[in-house]
Amino acid sequence: MASSSKDEFLTKEELEKFDYKELVKMDNIYSFKTSKKTKSTRVTKDAIVKRLLKEGVEKAKYKSKLSSYAKYEFEHPIAKTMPSGNYLPPDIVGKIYTMKEQIEDREYEIEFVKAVFQPKTLPANQSDFFNFMLNGSIVRLSMTDPNFQMHVANLYSPNYFIKDYKFLVSRLKVNAKKMRTEGVRYTEGRQRILANFFSVNVIPTYSRLIVINNILRKIEAYRNSHTVLKYPQEVASRLLEASYERYYWPPNNPLYVLKFYIKDLNKMLLKLRDYKILLSPSIIKELNKSLDKLNDYLVEPDPSIVGQANAKFSIRVLDNGPQFAVKSRYYSGTKSRSLVKNKIKVNNTKKLRHKLQKINMQDLKKSQKYSAMLRASQLMPKNVTHKRGKSL
């Protein structure tokens, strides 16, 4: 090293901040002025740094690169060289930070959707919150504060409607990167789309559940207050007066309206399934149990009665089915045990069938051979013996 001040040259710590490619360039410039590189010359990072320290590398020539490395380390702390001298190459650091950004983006996207489907602050009582359109007519569901708060808590509960948020992010095209690059316009646009989807699909589905439960309670209240074995036809035929408990076209009797809303609810549930939003299985189970209990109170259908309003019915709320898992699952790439067992069973059955066919063929051949021998013996005269060369 020249006799100049040590402050003019790069220190070991500063040299270690440079990436390997840059150090190789510096090594070629400074380390082989008086000697040549040979096959035995070590080209590890530590060896290059030692040679450069010995020769001396002017700091002024690499000041801008040093500052850029310092900035890079400040923005990417894991890029700093450890006391042991170990470090992460820039390409690895880049991959790690890209992965970190992607993970953070996915988390933010889910939280963005959750802000609409599962808000931290529930809405206050609004007279038209649960209203919905049905065949061109508005069904109004006004209610007291306690009832409103109960229904809103159910609506936004993660256990009432079960959502696959990863799927919703993809299906509703929520993109954190676009939020950063396109700003407020894109973000507010996505918020409006999410809010509209929730108000058009999820709230009306819950509203239909309100109507169904109201009618079930009305019939159950009559059952408890009147000691009759079966729901009377004259009572069942009465029209509903409350706007939220009736359908706007006749007949408006409780059972007709109940069946109509169950069918309509099933349509809504099927639509939500396309977005991997499922009504909780426990809610479906309880609702169908109530419908089964109601059937005990109804009579067998009588074809001679036109518009029979107290007859048993079979329609039920659709369950989620085996293909609609409650929690999102990921394909593992392996076959399920049941499929493997079925395949083994089929193969074993084929082998057994082939074996039986083979045994049957052998038995058949034996029986044919025996029959031929039997027929031949029957044709031969009795008490006749055979000797070699002549017969007696």
Image (cartoon, rainbow, N blue to C red):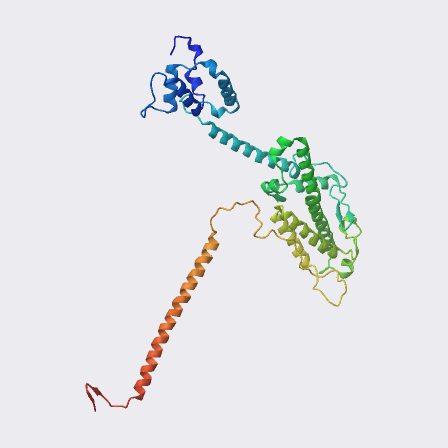
Of residues 119 and 172, the one drawn nearer to the viewer in this rendering: 172
Q: Is residue 136 visible?
A: yes
Instruction: State how many labels appear.
Output: 0
The residue under the point 66% across, 34% down is 186
Give how far across and how far down residue 244 sits, in percent.
76, 48
Figure quadrant of residue 6: top left
Q: In the displayed structure, would residue 376 be above or below residue 356? A: below
367 sits left or right of 129 in the view:
left
Give how far across and how far down residue 295 sits, in percent.
68, 58
Of residues 63 and 136, the one drawn nearer to the viewer in this rendering: 63
Figure quadrant of residue 365: bottom left
Q: In the displayed structure, would residue 234 be above or below residue 188? A: below
The residue under the point 48% across, 28% down is 93
Give how far across and how far down residue 96 sits, in percent.
49, 31
Q: Is residue 151 visible?
A: no
Q: In the displayed structure, would residue 359 be above or below residue 33? A: below
Give how far across and how far down residue 313 sits, in percent.
68, 60
On the rendered image, what quadrant is the N terminus found in? top left
363 sits left or right of 180 in the view:
left
Q: In the displayed structure, would residue 388 be above or below residue 35? A: below
On the rendered image, what quadrant is the C terminus found in? bottom left
